[in-house]
Image (cartoon, rainbow, N blue to C red):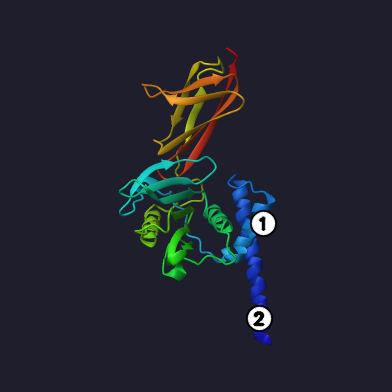
Amino acid sequence: MKNNRRQKTIHRSLAGRIAGALLALLLVAAAAGAAELPGLATKRLAEAAVRYEAAAWPSGPARTGLPLMAITADGYVGGPAELLPGAQVLRRFADDEGVERLLVELSVRHTAAEARTVLLEYLASVNSPHPVPEASGLGLAVGDAGYVGRAPGKRIAWIAFVRGNVTVRLVCLDPQADPHPEMAAIAAGIDRLVLEQPARADAGPGPRIAITALACSRRQCVAGEVVPLQLRLSAEPAAMRWVVGGPGQGYVERDDHGVWQLHTTKHGAIDLQCHVLGPNGYTDSGTTHIEVEVK
């Protein structure tokens, strides 16, 4: 009887620690602007945190990022980095015939707490009545915490793990195709690459790319005009993406001299966003505004 009471007390204590840790994770992510979560998404994260005992996950030190372009996979050719604003950074790997077989999703955050929230988002999206297995339970030691999505035939569909402030998901784009990629070996190689990066000695922001200047050369123009842009970056980007927002329309291209230019195509206000990816996985963004008048 005493053992039963003791077990119940332990379970209650663990549940309390899980709830407290999850609340801390969500507050940190929201405060940093990393997760403006609606109620349903928050509930799913809470359920995932309990299901996968997120409070018990170990937490390694924050690092200076992960060089996405340094990731390799034997037998596959890596493509360029893809920057999707508001989402993870992507890089695809193709076989000798040019067929894309692997996808690497990367998220480098300020803190380990924010990175663990990204892993929870992956796990919360799994549509299964049973938890997916831990990577360590399958003999795969990756990350501070890692999980594996299985495919028919005991194949691996994906591996997701968090190491400090870095979250990675390796996805097999066609688990039924042969030969099946050596998912465990590739994931372990990515994890080693994370561990090779210096640990940050403080809790401040990591070394990151920064947009130090972004502006249109004019505040107003006429639809159809080409407006030079002033853009200065602290480092050479691994990827960039321009987003034209507002009722006005246009597109951005570089001229023969390397100057970025806004080509306006429709009148109306334009909020022009620039998103940049640094070589170590950190990102930054900036916005400038221009009024485009009727021609």
**SS class of the residue under badge 1?**
helix
Q: Residue at x 44, y 69 (%)?
A: 138
The amino acid marked with disc number 2 is: Arg
Q: How many marks?
A: 2
x and y percentages locating residue 107 in the rendered image: 48, 49
Q: Is residue 55 left or right of residue 1?
A: left
Which image quarter is the C terminus in?
top right
x and y percentages locating residue 119 in the rendered image: 53, 56
Q: Is residue 97 above or below residue 289?
A: below
The amino acid marked with disc number 1 is: Lys
The mark nearer the N terminus, 1 or 2, is 2
Q: Residue at x 46, y 62 (%)?
A: 151
Choose between 217 and 156: the one closer to the eye. 156
x and y percentages locating residue 80 in the rendered image: 38, 41
- Which residue was labeled with disc 2? 6
Check the image and name the residue furthest to the bottom. Answer: 1
Q: Is residue 252 above or below residue 45?
A: above
Q: Is residue 171 above or below residue 32?
A: below
x and y percentages locating residue 243 in the rendered image: 53, 32
CB-based contact (under 8 Å), mark 1 and mark 2:
no
- Which residue was labeled with disc 1? 43
Q: Residue at x 55, y 16 (%)?
A: 223
User: Within the image, what quadrant is residue 178 found in?
Assistant: bottom left
Between marks 1 and 2 in the image, the one whose residue lies nearer the viewer: 1
Q: Residue at x 58, y 46 (%)?
A: 34
Q: Is residue 65 above or below residue 187?
A: above
Q: Residues within 10 Å of mark 1 (few under 14, many from 20)?
A: few
Which image quarter is the N terminus in?
bottom right
User: Within the image, what quadrant is residue 196 found in?
Assistant: bottom left
**SS class of the residue under badge 2?**
helix
- Alpha-carbon distance for marks 1 and 2? 29 Å
